[in-house]
Amino acid sequence: MKYDIIIVGAGISGATLAERYARVLNRKVLVVEKRDHIGGNCYDYYDKAGLLVPKYGPHFFHTNDKTVWNYVSKFTEWIPYQHRVLSFVDGLLVPIPVNINTVNILFGTNIKNAQEMKKWLKENTEKIKEPKNSEEVALTRVGKILYEKMFKNYTKKQWDMWPEDLDASVMSRIPVRMNFDDRYFTDTYQAMPKSGYTKIFENMLNHKNIKVLLNTDFFKIANKIKTYKKLFYTGPIDKFFNYKYGKLQYRSLKFKTQTLRMKFFQSRAQINYPNEYDFTRITEPKHATGQQSDWTTIIKESPTWDGEPYYPVPSRQNKIIYKKYEIDAFKLNDKNIFFIGRLANYKYINMDQAFRNALDLFNNLAKD
């Protein structure tokens, strides 16, 4: 096999690098993907009812990065969509992120403006100068009552760890609004791809210079790849180094998908269940795809330790192990081997960040 560029993984990072090297620099690119499809965890498909369903849970595109928006827009048309989430708490459906309506519904208050909301938070949150873990972060942001009603048990289900045992960075992502804005994201650009995410990746990889090998374990064919100019690895970094420093932990997800003969099952694309049930949320993609049908598909999502790796676990021990792999990976840059993406960098990143990181890496290396 003779290619200029070898890319391991056909997700966002891999597809972006493949597309750029093929189109911009006219390089011959081989993409090696262990799954039977492209698109990584963004992969979606049409079910028997003709509904677009995400195999690995829903993805809602949002970004403030105009460069990323313009880049992805080359490969898809968009439909407008702004994500709104409800959480089932005390038998009530309340908006999340926490905003004025959340507090008014749960506590029977009559907060009317930002000044009153700030006053309520000041009276109910704790003053911790340097939060050491996620529980302390939550106590400083939303206070003990909201934390226990909306976040404590949800976090335990999501991570199989209590917030007090989790790095402060996990709860640092909790947004709190001082107004009535119930949008989950406030980014400038928010939309869903008209024909789904898989179509984006098909368009990106549809080039005469790109060959994609599906159902292929890179490590089983690595010795057949004799020459290349650059290799990009987007898989788990500990696997690349044969777990020499130990395995890194990842939380995974399992999904129970049901197709029902009804217009809609719930009022939003996503409803969280922080306290009751084993699952964490139910999503209903039709709210986001805009499809018209007498059928709908719902997805119940439950965290697990088994299955595809989704979320790096930000514990102290994992950080120590990853740092050792990171040092070894950096040394391989001299051999034109580069590590990129959520699994290779052991870091949670949003879709737009994944596109941006891949574009930046390409632009930096293309100067050589």
Image: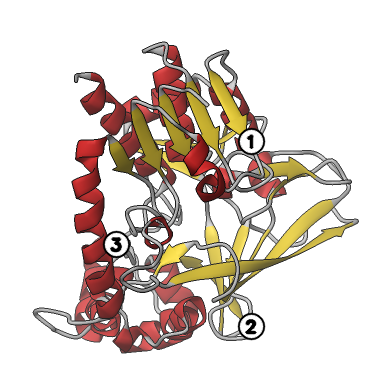
Say which element carries label 3: loop
Query: Residue at 25% of width from left, 37% of height from top?
Result: 335
348 and 77: which is toward the camera: 348
Tag 2 residue: 278
Disc nearer the start of the sequence (1/3): 3
181 and 174: which is toward the camera: 174
Query: Residue at 22% of width from left, 79% of height from top?
Result: 140
What amino acid is labelled 3 in the image?
Met
Q: Is residue 46 left or right of residue 112?
A: right
Q: Is residue 72 left or right of residue 308?
A: left
For residue 178, the mark is 3
User: From what the image shows, is residue 229 above or below residue 172?
Assistant: above
Crowding near the residue tagged with mark 3, few <14, some 14–19, many ≥20 C-alpha atoms within 10 Å: some
What amino acid is labelled 2 in the image?
Asp
Based on the displayed image, in which of its 4 quarters is residue 236 positioned? bottom left
Query: Residue at 52% of width from left, 36% of height from top?
Result: 224
Tag 1 residue: 198
What amino acid is labelled 1 in the image?
Thr
The CA span between labels 2 and 3 is 31 Å
Based on the displayed image, in which of its 4 quarters is residue 208 positioned? top right
| Of marks 2 and 1, the one in the foreground | 1
The CA span between labels 1 and 3 is 37 Å
Say which element carries label 2: loop
The CA span between labels 2 and 1 is 30 Å
Q: Quadrant of the C terminus?
A: top left
| Of marks 1 and 3, the one in the foreground | 1
Point out residue 25 in the picture as x, y percentages from the top left corner: 36, 12
22 and 282: which is toward the camera: 22
